[in-house]
Each structure stands twice: as C-alpha cells, then as structure tokens.
Image (cartoon, rainbow, N blue to C red):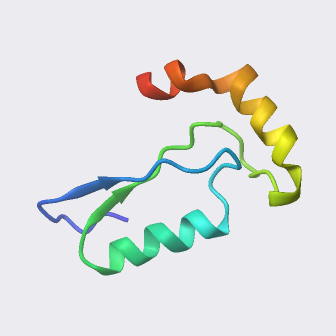
Amino acid sequence: MIQKSDTVIIVVHEIYGINQHMKNFCELISEQGFDVICPNLLERETPFDYSEEEVAYRHFKENVGFSDSLQK
C-alpha cells in the first residue's frame, strides 16, 4: 500500500496474524494517503481464526515472541 507519501505508518497485527480485519484497517489508512506497512510477524500464510485465541497466543509466545517482533 505504497502511496509515496511523506508519512509511513507501521501497523502491528494482532496475535492472529494478517487477517481480513487487519487488511481492512491498513486499507483504511492507505485511503487517507499514507504509506502502510504491516509486516507478517507470524510468517504464516493463513492467519488464525478468532476462535483459536489460545492456539494463536501459544504460537506467538513459542514461535515469535516480543523480542523477535521488535527485531523484525
């Protein structure tokens, strides 16, 4: 969602990954003329469903973590 604006907004997704909600949110920001980056911290093609909260949280804690997210 590159607009070539003077402002870049980095969106950090929920523990579920880049789901439709996150895509819609990024699109909304992009429509305002901002460049938007939402890195896939989970490195998964398919996001977790909201009904998989415990699994998503466990996956984040065991495979991603806050330190690795900060580095990315």
* Residue depicted at 45% across the width and 74% down the height: 27
Which residue is found at the position 87% from the left and 50% from the top?
Answer: 52
**x 88%, y 57%: residue:** 51
Numbered marks: total = 0
Q: Residue furthest left?
A: 6
Q: Residue furthest front?
A: 54
Quadrant location, the C terminus = top left
Residue 44 position, x and y percent, is 71, 41
63 sits left or right of 6 in the view: right
Camera-nearest residue between 53 and 18: 53
Image coordinates for residue 53, horizontal then vertical, percent: 82, 48
**In percent of the image, x 30 and y 56: which residue is there?**
9
Q: Quadrant of residue 65?
A: top right
Position of 41 relative to 66 (above/below): below
User: Who is closer to the viewer here, 31 or 62?
Assistant: 62
Q: Position of residue 34 (x, y in %)?
A: 25, 68
